[in-house]
Amino acid sequence: MDRRPPGALLQRSLMFIYLGLFILLPIAAITMASLEEGVTTLWNSISSAQALSALRLTLVTAFIMMIINVIMGTLTAYILVRYPFPGKKIMNALIDLPFAVPTVVTGIMLVILYGPTSTLGSILSGFDLEVVFAKPGIILALLFVTYPFVIRSVQPVLMEMTADTEDAARTMGASNLRVFVTVTLPALLPSILTGAALSFSRAVGEFGSIVVVAGNIPFKSQVAAVYIYGELESNNPQGAMGLSVVLLIISFVVLIFLNLLQRQKWLTGGQS
């Protein structure tokens, strides 16, 4: 007896068509287009000094952002779940604001705040600290656009955890720091790594806020996404596709990491 719901075949067909049109087809198109002029041409476009500099800056700033996000995102989620305080609901709502703010607006806000003509920017310049059109500005922009990822990954896990185990550890003489490191943190590790991977992947392809804050200065503040846009503007699609394929591979590796992470029984407490 066929237990499949009516229209199951049609539903699956629509899902595969949708997946193919919006995910698989574009990936196949850019991969084939990047190889049209041969592997050597593709490699030359990737290994040029300017492309490597842009890719290096992208990965370095994304990694620094990810470390900060892991620390502050986990701390923020812990405070939101474990401690009551005035304005908690408002703060919790504001966390998702970066998802609603256009990334270009994010860049403009940072330029207004930290730009060389702003009050804060002038003060920082007096200490030889350059934010806008430099690496710190890129990191700040990435922190803003990826702010919710770690928090929203960790928060539901903390909400499901009871405080009984933590309280038992405290009654045995463990300090709050030791309780967090030995009891709470291991349970949060899968969600922390998931949020970190998502924020890193998001940062690698960020364009809107970076193009305003970084200033697109080659070998100084030019990230991969802005470099790709510049190559397209310079009528060099092959150069743009080369680095685009690299970013695609990085995203694919992150996706594999997330899937492996979800399958690891030692991280998920035995759940597959």
Image (spheres, rainbow, N blue to C red):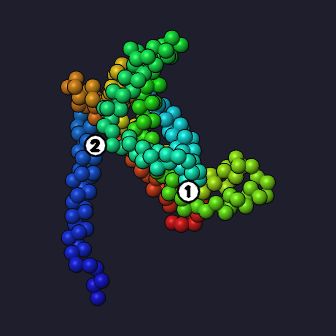
Extreme right residue here?
173
Can I make out residue 246 in this image?
Answer: no
The dot on residue 158 is 1
Above or below — where is 29 with respect to 54?
below
Distance of mark 2 from mark 1, alpha carbons?
41 Å
Q: 238 left or right of 176? A: left
Q: Which mark's residue is nearer the viewer, 2 or 1?
A: 1
Front in this rendered view, residue 165 or 61 = 165
Q: Residue at x 45, y 30 (%)?
A: 140
The residue that appears at 61% across and 62% down in the rendered structure is 162
Name the foreground residue: 2 vs 27: 2
* Secondary structure category for the residue under label 2: helix
The picture places residue 18, in percent across and down from the top left corner, at 23, 58
Indicate left or right for 245 with 20 as reference.
right
Residue projecting furthest to the bottom: 1
> Callout 1, which amino acid?
Leu
Seen at 59% across and 53% down, the residue is 82
Quarter of the image for residue 269 reads bottom right
User: Residue 219 shows which numbered tag?
Assistant: none
Q: Is residue 43 above or below residue 184?
A: above
Q: List x then y, in percent, for residue 63.
A: 50, 36
For marks 2 and 1 on the same chain, the one whose residue lies earlier in the sequence: 2
Can you identify the residue that label 2 sits on? 31
Q: Hey, which quadrant is residue 1 in on the image?
A: bottom left
Q: Which of 6 and 13 is in front in this view?
A: 6
SS at mark 1 in the image: helix
